[in-house]
Image (cartoon, grey):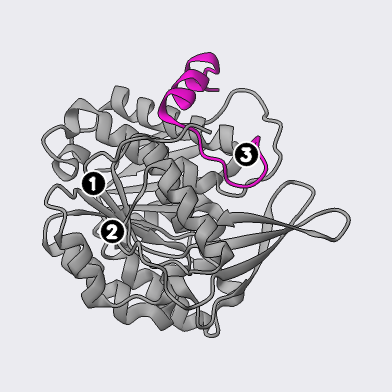
């Protein structure tokens, strides 16, 4: 894995869970892997060359030290570099025959949930060049709403691009109705919303197909862009003005597992958006200027990042050049 030796200026701030995935092996033993959707996104975005700040604290235990070391190696800056005395979150992950993971979480009294609105606000205020903030995954737990939701509202009001990756985990939420309500409230703050077909099913949205559900959701949100991922069927990029683009890999992949694939996809998408000439004057105004060429390039790069990730055990995000090389060697279908 390529490590980043110098910290670039911060353009993205990431808030949410960092945990250890205990992946069940065929013999019943557990393989510990660094994980958490938001943690994976921070790593993946930094490896794409985007200056990235991770906002949540990490434990001083063995797992917390490993999480911290990997973030630093990948080039992520830490808003809270000093360890806290709470334990690291754990997730037990069972992977089915198709490589899809099923999760059970252990997250009471853990380090990455030791956040506050005041702390999040203070940490991002130190970075004048910050362009976008991202959250999602387990940070969408309604029990943590007092920290994350007003923070996102303040970031949107400040003119920063808000990115929300739904990445829903309804099986571990105590109140599914409250969870769905809160997820919709968070999505209402997003300029860029990312959801999978599975996320749409969990939200129980109307529509005969995932695309129809996504289009209906975008119409109900103030978001500029909604990204819909469909696994092997590729992804859609939907704009508020009705323009849509779809792309998928032309050839089947040798899938090891899909852990971190969506996180790598989103990192590639954001990095590619930031690299477009149309966004040079700012990401938010640039979203409205996406044309067919730019949208195709953004989707191709995002899919390349996901495709490389699924061919590896656990979440091992690619760097920018590796993803670009894959994209050049593998035309889309």
Residue 200 in the figure: left or right of residue 56:
right
Q: CA distance from mark 1 to mark 2?
A: 20 Å
Residue that numbered label 2 is attached to: 190
Residue that numbered label 3 is attached to: 310
The spot of residue 307 in percent (x, y) is 57, 33
Residue 89 in the figure: left or right of residue 71:
right
Q: Residue at x 24, y 32 (%)?
A: 290
**Which of the marked residues, 1 or 3, is nearer the chain's N terminus?**
1
Residue 323 in the figure: left or right of residue 187:
right
**Which of the marked residues, 3 or 2, is nearer the chain's N terminus?**
2
Magenta stretch bounds: 310-333
Q: Quadrant of residue 135?
A: bottom left
Q: Is residue 152 visible?
A: yes
Q: Nearer the viewer, residue 173 or 238?
A: 173
Q: Quadrant of the C terminus?
A: top right
Classify mark 2: residues with Cα within 10 Å, few (<14), some (14-19) or many (20+).
many
Q: Residue at x 54, y 53 (%)?
A: 197
Residues at marks 1 and 3 touching, judged by CB atoms closer than 8 Å: no
């Amino acid at each position: 894995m390529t490590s980043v030796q110098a910290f670039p200026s911060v353009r993205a701030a990431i808030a949410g869970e960092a945990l250890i995935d205990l992946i069940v092996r065929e013999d019943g033993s557990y393989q510990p892997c660094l994980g958490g959707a938001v943690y994976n996104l921070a790593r993946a975005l930094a490896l794409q060359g985007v200056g990235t700040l991770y906002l949540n604290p990490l434990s001083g235990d063995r797992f917390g030290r490993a999480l911290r070391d990997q973030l630093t190696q990948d080039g992520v800056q830490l808003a809270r570099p000093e360890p806290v005395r709470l334990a690291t979150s754990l997730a037990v992950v069972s992977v089915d025959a198709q490589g899809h993971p099923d999760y059970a979480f252990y997250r009471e009294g853990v380090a990455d949930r030791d956040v506050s609105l005041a702390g999040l606000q203070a940490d991002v205020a130190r970075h004048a060049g910050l362009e976008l903030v991202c959250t999602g995954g387990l940070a969408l737990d309604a029990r943590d709403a007092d920290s994350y939701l007003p923070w996102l509202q303040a970031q949107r009001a400040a003119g920063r691009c808000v990115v929300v990756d739904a990445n829903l985990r309804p099986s571990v939420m105590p109140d599914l109705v409250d969870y769905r309500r809160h997820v919709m409230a968070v999505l209402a703050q997003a300029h860029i919303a990312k959801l999978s077909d599975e996320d749409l099913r969990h939200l129980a949205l109307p529509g005969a197909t995932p695309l129809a559900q996504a289009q209906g959701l975008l119409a109900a949100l103030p978001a500029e862009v909604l990204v819909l991922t469909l696994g092997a069927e590729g992804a859609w990029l939907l704009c508020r003005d009705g323009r849509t683009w779809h792309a998928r890999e032309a050839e089947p992949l040798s899938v090891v597992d899909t852990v971190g694939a969506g996180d790598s996809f989103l990192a590639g998408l954001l990095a590619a958006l930031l690299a477009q000439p149309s966004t040079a004057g700012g990401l938010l105004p640039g979203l409205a200027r996406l044309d067919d060429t730019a949208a195709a390039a953004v989707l191709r790069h995002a899919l390349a990042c996901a495709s490389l990730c699924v061919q590896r055990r656990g979440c091992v995000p690619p760097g920018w050049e590796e993803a670009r090389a894959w994209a050049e060697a593998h035309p889309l279908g």
